[in-house]
Image (tube, grey):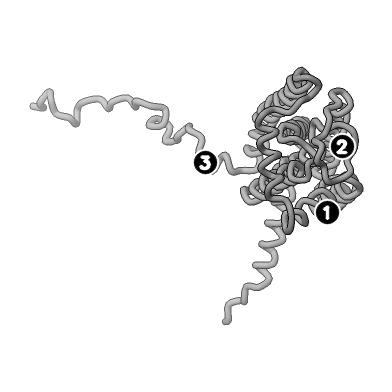
């Protein structure tokens, strides 16, 4: 006689989860996220909203900063502006002058407006990244246009101890805006940590050089930073999808070339 509690006679328990029933874990894996299709889809979904909001807010904050400045008796400097300027006056001379004048030439005039953007765009075209070249040129042009608009709108006077010849309007700093645009744009085009670090250092040195030369107050450089970085983010949001698709295509080409080279160096097995 068979015992009622014999486990061999009891019905099998139903699976608790879909994974136990099908043998497949429906949870997405890291590997799925690394596939080109999923990465591009993620760029389309997330790549527009964050930079669009962040960039727009940055430009608006810069404009509000300009309004606050001009509400202070026709643009009188803040206390931190004057303290920063006094500290830099004490260290002028020698190597600091050389570096500051170099940054002045690099970030403005013919070099900053034409040579750097055109050269960068040409390199990107050679690397078969036309959308990246377009992004860089458009971001640089829009940033420069907004800077000139705000300069003429606010008309803030420059510091009296300026060492270089500059155009009208102290707020915002066009040199710093240009540097910030370049830093963010190249960080987007070449998304590597070292590129972002180099861009941050370049922008910081440019901002320091502008106040060192007495061309701007510190608050002017803050406005330039917000505008340059903000414009680069907004233009990135507009072109995010095509930029990511182009980047993935280049990665695929480079990977294929590297694989072909590696295969060509494999020694056939001896018989």
| Quarter of the figure with the C terminus | bottom right
Left or right: residue 35 versus residue 104 is left
Q: Secondary structure at mark 3?
A: helix
Residue placed under numbered mark 2 in the picture: 141
Q: Earlier in the sequence, mark 1 or mark 3?
A: 3
- Spatial distance from mark 2 to mark 1, Cα to Cα? 18 Å
Residue 43, how many percent across, how many down? 67, 35
- Spatial distance from mark 3 to mark 2, Cα to Cα? 39 Å
Q: Secondary structure at mark 1?
A: helix
| Quarter of the figure with the N terminus | top left
Residue 238, how many percent across, how many down? 78, 30
Q: Is residue 13 above or below residue 203?
A: above
Residue placed under numbered mark 3 in the picture: 30
Residue drawn where x is 84% and y is 30% of the image: 157
Left or right: residue 251 versus residue 118 is left
Disc 1 crowd, CA 10 A, few/some/many (<14, 14-19, 20+): few
Disc 3 crowd, CA 10 A, few/some/many (<14, 14-19, 20+): few
Nearer-the-camera pick, 229 or 13: 229
Left or right: residue 167 versus residue 9 is right
Residue drawn where x is 63% and y is 51% of the image: 194
- Spatial distance from mark 1 to mark 3, Cα to Cα? 34 Å
Q: Of circles 2 and 1, which is in front?
A: 2
Q: Secondary structure at mark 2?
A: helix
Q: Is residue 2 above or below residue 249?
A: above
């Amino acid at each position: 006689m068979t015992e009622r509690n014999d486990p061999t006679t009891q019905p099998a328990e139903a699976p608790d989860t879909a994974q136990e029933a099908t043998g497949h874990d429906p949870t997405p894996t890291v590997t799925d996220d690394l596939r080109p299709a999923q990465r591009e889809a993620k760029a389309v979904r997330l790549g527009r909203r964050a930079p669009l909001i962040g960039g727009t807010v940055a430009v608006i904050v810069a404009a509000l900063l300009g309004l606050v400045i001009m509400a202070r008796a026709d643009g009188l400097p803040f206390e931190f502006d004057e303290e920063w300027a006094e500290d830099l006056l004490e260290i002028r001379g020698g190597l600091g002058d050389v570096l500051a004048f170099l940054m002045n030439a690099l970030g403005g005039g013919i070099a900053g407006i034409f040579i750097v953007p055109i050269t960068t765009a040409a390199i990107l075209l050679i690397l078969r990244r036309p959308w990246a070249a377009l992004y860089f040129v458009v971001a640089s042009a829009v940033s420069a246009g907004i800077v000139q608009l705000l300069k003429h709108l606010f008309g803030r006077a420059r510091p009296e101890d300026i060492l270089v010849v500059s155009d009208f309007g102290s707020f915002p700093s066009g040199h710093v805006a240009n540097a910030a645009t370049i830093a963010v744009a190249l960080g987007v085009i070449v998304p590597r940590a070292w590129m972002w670090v180099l861009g941050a250092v370049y922008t910081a040195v440019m901002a320091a050089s502008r106040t060192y030369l007495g061309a701007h107050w510190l608050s002017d450089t803050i406005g330039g930073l917000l505008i340059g970085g903000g414009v680069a983010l907004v233009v990135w949001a507009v072109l995010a999808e095509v930029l990511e698709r182009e980047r993935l295509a280049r990665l695929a080409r480079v990977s294929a070339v590297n694989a072909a080279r590696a295969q060509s160096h494999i020694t056939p097995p001896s018989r």
